[in-house]
Amino acid sequence: MAKGIVIAGMAGVGKTVLAQKYANIMDLDHLLYKYTYPKEILENKAFEQLKGFLQGRTLNPKWPENYISKIFEALEQYDIVLVPASREIIEYFEKINFEYFLCYPTVKSKTIYLERYKNRNTNQEWIGKMNQNFQNDVKYFESKKARKLVLSGNETLEDKLKELEMIQ
């Protein structure tokens, strides 16, 4: 039986930074499980630049089972496993009645998040999609039955977990 918890976090909430600071937390991005890329693209693009980069990528035929099994494997080793708040993953969790946390910002925080994406060198096309879909994504998250960690302003996932005494 898994020992950890899963937090599905919207892009920009601070998953990667949090996992870099705490040995008991894993950031398990889905990008390299969902897609396959030619070797030359992987060698020449930083990870953040792959987000929204469509050239040469193909859907991994093992998706999403390969990623879901990796999540459950990580739950055996980490107290907290961070995954992106992708609709596919959320719908899968809800389909199997899996308990998870959902972390996302308020709609009023949109400008802050767009700036975060820009500062981490994310692909401009991807930022444009996030800009266009931000409000709808937040409404979608609000409609889900997961336990929610809603961030305001510059608050990060780390701030919220400390406030709730889930980390120290």
Image: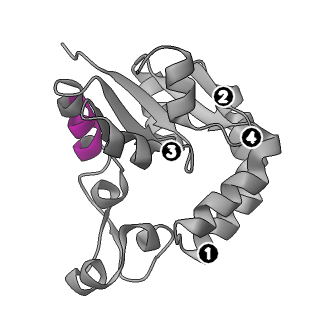
Percent position of residue 46, x then y: 36, 74
- Magenta range: 66-72
In the picture provided, is 17 more to the left or to the right than 9? Answer: left
The residues bearing labels 3 and 2 have C-alpha atoms spaced at a distance of: 13 Å
In the image, which is nearer the foreground, mark 3 or mark 2? 3
Q: Residues within 10 Å of mark 1 (few under 14, many from 20)?
A: few
Earlier along the polypeptide chain: callout 1 or callout 3?
3
- On the image, numbered disc 2 is attached to which residue? 150
Residue that numbered label 4 is attached to: 153
Name the kind of residue labelled 4 in the image: Gly
Q: Nearer the viewer, mark 2 or mark 1?
A: 2
Alpha carbon separation for disc pair 1 and 3: 21 Å
Q: Is residue 22 left or right of residue 87?
A: left
Q: Which amino acid does label 3 sit on?
A: Gly
Residue at position x 23%, y 52% from top?
Answer: 62
In this rendered view, identify the residue nearer to me: 73 or 26: 26
Q: Residue at x 27, y 77 (%)?
A: 42
Q: What residue type is labelled 1?
A: Glu
Q: Is residue 130 depicted above or below 88 in this figure?
A: below
> Reading the chain from its start, which is encountered first: label 2 or label 1?
1
Residue 130 visible to the viewer: no
State the residue lying farthest toward the front: 168
Quarter holding the N terminus? top left
Q: Do the residues labelled 2 and 1 touch (CB within 8 Å)?
A: no
